[in-house]
Image (cartoon, grey):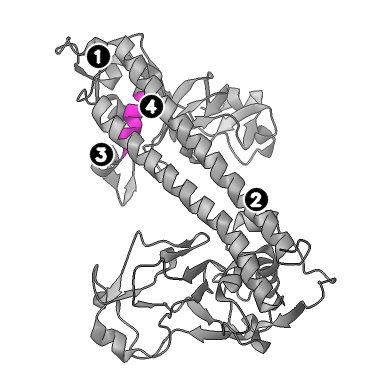
Amino acid sequence: MFIPKHIKQNGSKLIDNLPSGWKYVKLGNTSITIIDGDRGKNYPKQTEFTNVGFCLFLNAGNVTNEGFNFTTQAFISEQRDNLLRNGKLQRQDVVLTTRGTLGNVAYFDSKVQQEHIRINSGMVILRADEKNVSSHYLYTLLQSPVFYNQIETFITGSAQPQLPIQILNQFSIPLPPIREQQRIAAVLSLWDEAILQTRKLIDACKRRKKGFMQKLLTGKWRFPEFRNNKDDWKYVKLGDVAETYSGGTPSRTNKAFFNGTIPWIKSGELNQTNIYATEEHITEEALQQSAAKYVEANTLLYALYGATAGIPAITRIEATINQAILAIIPSKSLDSVFLFYWLQSNKEKYLSEFLQGGQPNLSGEIVKEYFIPLPPFQEQRKIASLLSLLDEEIHNWEQQFEKLKLQKMGLMQKLLTGQIRV
């Protein structure tokens, strides 16, 4: 879906009663200039992009619903940059995605370190005349339900949704006096800063957890009470210390099979650390007449192939699984939570070894051959407990992150329609 989910759930329509001094105006009737990129003969070829260079050439991943993201970067040379005409950013420009994923917005303010940036053919630049329209206010407005609602109304195309400039020019925006625009933007920027800092905390917590996993799960770091026993770690095959089994899928031609009460876990749901609920349920008849397998609560599950291959999860409910999921039942010498974290830390290693046709394709027999560390059971439990605490900390910050975004969305809805005045 090309409209961000959190926007759709909290959308609002334009309201009729604006405060005195406010007005609705079409973008095309404002001093905001909408600039397309250069799509002519000088548009850079794929072979001309480099990892470093003079001018950053934006791709779809660089403009998100949380602003700029420069995790991946592609550059063009100064020579190629000089050949291009439209589409180069100036400070205080706002970038809007107009093809594929519509409505992602980023703001080229002084916090962005890169000096030379160009948009690609799936974006436009909105450049405000600061005398009449605050660029910061415009950036805030384009993130709001007031704007996203209109995207849903005016989108063109189906397989490849697009937002042409002539359509954008028809969008209505609430425009208070310039001073109030600036004050609204300043208030909402406080939430932006809180959201940004919380995101940084989450990333820092994840890096810390990754470092702890690398040390604790290899025996490089040990708790004081275990340090004197240097030879009590050993490596064993997973199949020697755990039982494994996978299931099958009931026939979907019999739709009645999926109208039951028994939770049915699909491999796509293993992107969660813990599984407390599922989207689908099957009947007792489906369980009996298919290869679907029952798993108890607190069973360790492991995705074998597809988009979630190599991801472990622990189900907190009694449920059934299909052939894309492996249930792992550790023996008394192996703690399931310790194994969960070991599988999590070694995901990329095993996926790179078992790529088939570009897709990871594991099996129960392959997983049983994994060599895993087997420290003393009490040490396993202590490692698992510490990593669980780190996960809980990350989860708490992620909840705070979502709350801040919801708070900002609610405040935007009020401030940008004049229901609350600064």
Q: Earlier in the sequence, mark 2 or mark 4?
A: 4
Whether 372 is among the magenta residues is no
Q: Earlier in the sequence, mark 3 or mark 2?
A: 3
**Dot 3 amino acid type:** Lys
Camera-nearest residue between 76 and 240 = 76
Q: Residues within 10 Å of mark 4 (few under 14, many from 20)?
A: some
Please give left or right for residue 74 compared with residue 6 in the image.
left
**Dot 1 amino acid type:** Pro
Can you give x and y, in whole percent of width and height, for residue 275 in the image? 54, 30
Q: Which residue is mark 3?
A: 349
Dot 2: what SS?
helix
Q: Earlier in the sequence, mark 3 or mark 4?
A: 3
Magenta stretch bounds: 339-347
Q: Which mark is residue 387?
A: 4
Q: Which mark is residue 224?
A: 1
In which quadrant of the rendered view does residue 360 lie? top left
In which quadrant of the rendered view does residue 352 lie? top left
